[in-house]
Image: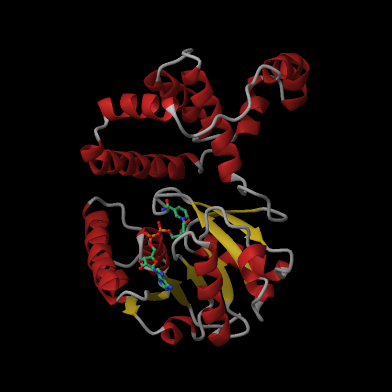
Amino acid sequence: MCSQKKVGIIGSGLIGRSWAMLFAGAQYNVYLYDIDEQQIEVALADIGQQLKLLEGNGLLRGSLNANDQYALIKGTTQLKEAVEDAVLIQECVPENLELKRKVWKGIDDIANPNSILSSSTSALLPSTFTDHLKHRKNAIVSHPVNPPYYVPLVELVPAPWTDPDVVKQTRRIMEDIGQTPVSLSKEIVGFGVNRLQYALLNEAINLVSEGIFDVHDIDKVMSDGLGMRYAFLGVLETTHLNAEGFVSYCERYGKMIEGISRDYKPAPKYEGNIVRQVADQLEKSTPLERLQEKRNFRDLGLSKLSLLKKQMSKLF
Ligand SMILES: NC(=O)c1ccc[n+]([C@@H]2O[C@H](COP(=O)([O-])OP(=O)(O)OC[C@H]3O[C@@H](n4cnc5c(N)ncnc54)[C@H](O)[C@@H]3O)[C@@H](O)[C@H]2O)c1
């Protein structure tokens, strides 16, 4: 691995900006590349504003002030400048297989042989866009969860040819910037986050579709119920504590869970009447023109929760 703490961020949209801020917070030299010069200007202005706002609210990460963090981020339209000698190159271009294949080929042609080639893709399997790379053993997916500045999880997904050492190095880098990496042993459709997320989403849609719950009540089941526990314990540890350990939980509740599970309907279709029905109820409480306001509310709540989690992590 290169000794310099330089990272190249490829694509300066929502996720590229978040990565830039996270790496600058950990004092990396960040090169933010985009094909669109205007997009870089917008991104840098937005990052500057966000860092100031975070500083003002006492939520800035790392030990440098907002100005010093901002000074570590350099915008560029020269791919070579972003890629050359970077410890890690984090690709954040739109979720399109052909585009990712093309962008990665361009990076691979000029990358240092030791640079980690990391993609932010939410759902594309790494084997589908890294097979043609000469440095494909350095390729990995580092999938963040939105908004990454407040939600620290990063799923690390190797391709079949990824060097296990690259997984370890990426894990260390993610820890270094204050994220929480989790590693999949091999690629699988949906990775881990979306497999769990969509299992819940499918069941929520089915329950609304059958008229068992309305949209607001099913959402409260998570926000005021299960989600509160899951903010501190995972799905499995929750069961461990709900009985005298996991073995006792399975003895007590296993047959009941198997019975309820046999009642699940297949995954719903995300089209037709049910889409309008759910959208109408959601738009009543959060109209489309107030989405940004609600996102700000979400981010403020998440920032406070992340502070609480930090304090709580010292207790057990
Ligand atoms: N938005 C999310 O919630 C989220 C969460 C996790 C992962 N992701 C993944 O992160 C990636 C980026 O998502 P986003 O929401 O930031 O997208 P976005 O559309 O906001 O930004 C994409 C950026 O890529 C730039 N771009 C387009 N073609 C390019 C090229 N050839 N070279 C360099 N830059 C190019 C665009 O100008 C734009 O700035 C996607 O793979 C997405 O699936 C997104």
Residue placed furthest toward the front: 272
Residue 288 versus residue 122 in the image, above or below: above
Q: Residue at x 55, y 26 (%)?
A: 203
Residue 244 rendering spot, x and y as whole percentages: 71, 20
- Horizontal relation, residue 225 to residue 246: left or right: left
The answer to whether residue 209 is seen in the rendering is: yes
Q: Residue at x 39, y 54 (%)?
A: 149
Number of numbered discs present? 0
The answer to whether residue 316 is seen in the rendering is: no
Which image quarter has ligand 1? bottom left
Quarter of the N terminus within the rendering: bottom right
- Horizontal relation, residue 189 to residue 285: left or right: right
- Horizontal relation, residue 115 to residue 61: left or right: right
Camera-side residue of 172 and 287: 287
Residue 142 versus residue 259 in the image, above or below: below
Residue 128 rendering spot, x and y as whole percentages: 64, 63
Residue 113 rendering spot, x and y as whole percentages: 62, 84
Q: Residue at x 39, y 39 (%)?
A: 305
